[in-house]
Amino acid sequence: MASEDPIYRVAFVNQDKVYELYVRHVYPSDMWGFVELEGFIFGSRSELVVDPAEEKLKQQFDDVKRSIVPMQAIIRIDEVRQEGVAKITDAKGTVTAFPTIPPKRQ
């Protein structure tokens, strides 16, 4: 059986939005408390039907070699058989950012 590179679906919170991306590599960062994402995968550019949300993500991550995401922003990481459509959705419902230090009172 041939060994194929795994594909990961990573969901994380960024500015009140949930980003769902497909990447080839996920590993802990040298910076404590962060996760590194590399090898972003997006749909084929030759497709006739274009998803505006995926196009926005393609543009946003077009020149990105590696993205370093805070560990507390990660919702889940799944190893999948094949890539799907990358998307951005509103963070509503039970998605809550990890507690942080409250701002100082003034």
Image (spheres, rainbow, N blue to C red):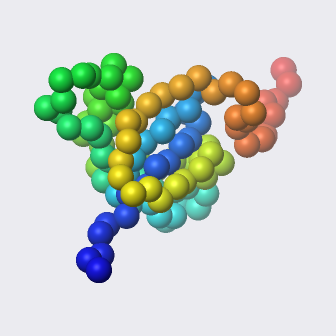
Left or right of 61 in this view: 45: left
Q: Using the rendered image of the protein, determine whether residue 66 is visible from the camera's viewpoint.
A: no
Residue at point 58%, 61% (across, down)? 32
Q: Quadrant of residue 36?
A: bottom left
Q: In the image shown, does 95 or 3 lie closer to the viewer?
A: 3
Q: Is residue 25 left or right of residue 91?
A: left
Compared to residue 43, the image places residue 32 above or below, namely: below
Residue farthest toward the bottom in the current orientation of the protein: 1
- Residue 104, picture quadrant: top right
- Extreme residue toward the left, this view: 46
Q: Is residue 64 visible?
A: yes
Q: Nearer the viewer, residue 100 or 80?
A: 80
Residue 95 in the image: state x and y as whole percent.
Answer: 70, 35
Q: Position of residue 4 (x, y in %)?
A: 29, 69
Q: Is residue 88 above or below residue 20?
A: above
Residue shown at 50% from the left, 35% from the top: 19
Q: Quadrant of the C terminus?
A: top right
Residue drawn at point x = 54 percent, y = 43 percent:
11
Residue sitting at the far front: 1
Image quadrant of residue 42? top left
The x, y position of residue 2, in whole percent, is: 26, 77
Give x and y (percent) for residue 46. 13, 32
| Residue at figure coordinates x 49%, y 48% from the top left | 10
How many numbered marks appear? 0
Instruction: Work out which quarter of the rendered image holds the N terminus and state it.
Output: bottom left
